[in-house]
Image: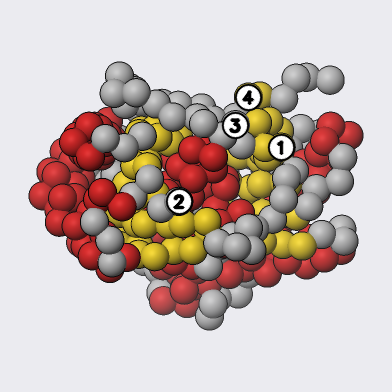
Amino acid sequence: MNVLGIETTCDETAASIVMPGEDGRGRILSNEVLSQIAEHAAYGGVVPEIAARAHVEVLDRLVARALDTAGMSLSQVDGIAVAAGPGLIGGVLIGLVTAKTLALVARKPLIAVNHLEAHALTARLTDGIGFPYLLLLASGGHTQLVAVKGVGDYVRLGTTVDDAIGEAFDKVAKLLGLGYPGGPEVERMAETGNPERFALPRPMLGRREPNFSLSGLKTALRIEAERLEPLSGADVADLCASFQAAVVDVVVDRVRVALREFGAMAGHPTALVAAGGVAANGAIRRALTTQANEAGLAFVAPPLSLCGDNGAMIAWAGIERLRLGLVDDLTAPARARWPFAEAAAVA
Ligand code: KG4
Ligand code: ZN
């Protein structure tokens, strides 16, 4: 079973061919990703119109390249999976219309995949882990703790009440005059900084529900930064290090609470999993590794190349759904908003 995966929901255009491997993992036959970062950099964030135009300019060539690299033709794929949301609607439409056209012409099943579900299932593509597991899904637009119980069976234990973690990194970077996307820049600066110089707040620490709040932390950092103007390189490094340390403390505390809730609801998890762009952050990965080990759990996070948006995760989610007969027809809608996990029932 070979599935083509197409991703265009944000600022990466991506196409990939994946097949199930014998060990329960996926085998990635090709994974083409074209980042639009350069096109958006001047604006300090993703401009939807520019993104949509950039997707439409390269997607057909990228799909051709993914097939080429995998050494196959369209007639040899068994399904066409596409991220049908959530995301910027212009980009989503371009991916979806392309996938529908290919599915129609080549008479292949179409699988309309939720982008967040694809991030959530990536740990099975890379590590073949079984259900259920606890997932920290953290990207530029989302921050959720989810009990992943099966394909299509996701219970949201907690979410952010304001900014997503990636968004907070991006805003902090902008505030400090660092580049976009901000996460990698802040992490790089933090390496040489003193994480104890600024006593930033740890919002939500100790709260009973595993929710997040990041806007207060960002504001506290802005106030410190304004007080110090003009900022030296060392100031910026110390601010980044202090910010990242606060985020790590919050994440570990929220995961601790989520693990407790998970146990009461779904039993023993097979692993603690991180996904989404923020899962690329080394400090967060190290802290979660320690935390998982202390809880007797494996920590699984995708390799850096599969943390950010990519087509392989879409293809894999397509495989998972296709195996269960979960296919879509040509009326599948593009969705700017598309929650993938049900909120947990309040105990
Ligand atoms: O999943 P993703 O590639 O795109 C979506 O938002 O769907 O995530 C991008 C986000 C951005 O906010 C970016 O700043 C953040 O992930 N990010 C990081 C790191 N690398 C990317 N945040 C913290 N540390 C990083 N190393
Ligand atoms: Zn994403």
Image height of 210 relative to 309, above or below: above
Q: Which residue in the protein does label 4 denote?
A: 342
Furthest-bottom residue in this view: 192
Label 1, label 4: how many angstroms apart (C-alpha)? 12 Å
Q: Which residue in the protein does label 1 denote?
A: 149
Instruction: Please name the residue shown 72% across and 50% down the image.
Output: 130
Residue type highlighted by circle 4 = Glu
Q: Counting residues from the N terminus, which is met first, the one under dot 1 or under dot 4? A: 1
The spot of residue 59 in percent (x, y) is: 18, 50
Q: Counting residues from the N terminus, which is met first, the one under dot 4 or under dot 3? A: 3
Are dots 2 and 4 in contact, CB under 8 Å? no
Instruction: Please name the residue shown 22% across and 32% down the image.
Output: 104
Quadrant of the image occupied by residue 308: bottom left
Label 3, label 2: how many angstroms apart (C-alpha)? 20 Å
Q: Which residue in the protein does label 2 denote?
A: 1
Quadrant of the image occupied by residue 90: top left
Are dots 3 and 1 in contact, CB under 8 Å? no
Res. 54 in view:
no
- Secondary structure under tag 4 reads strand
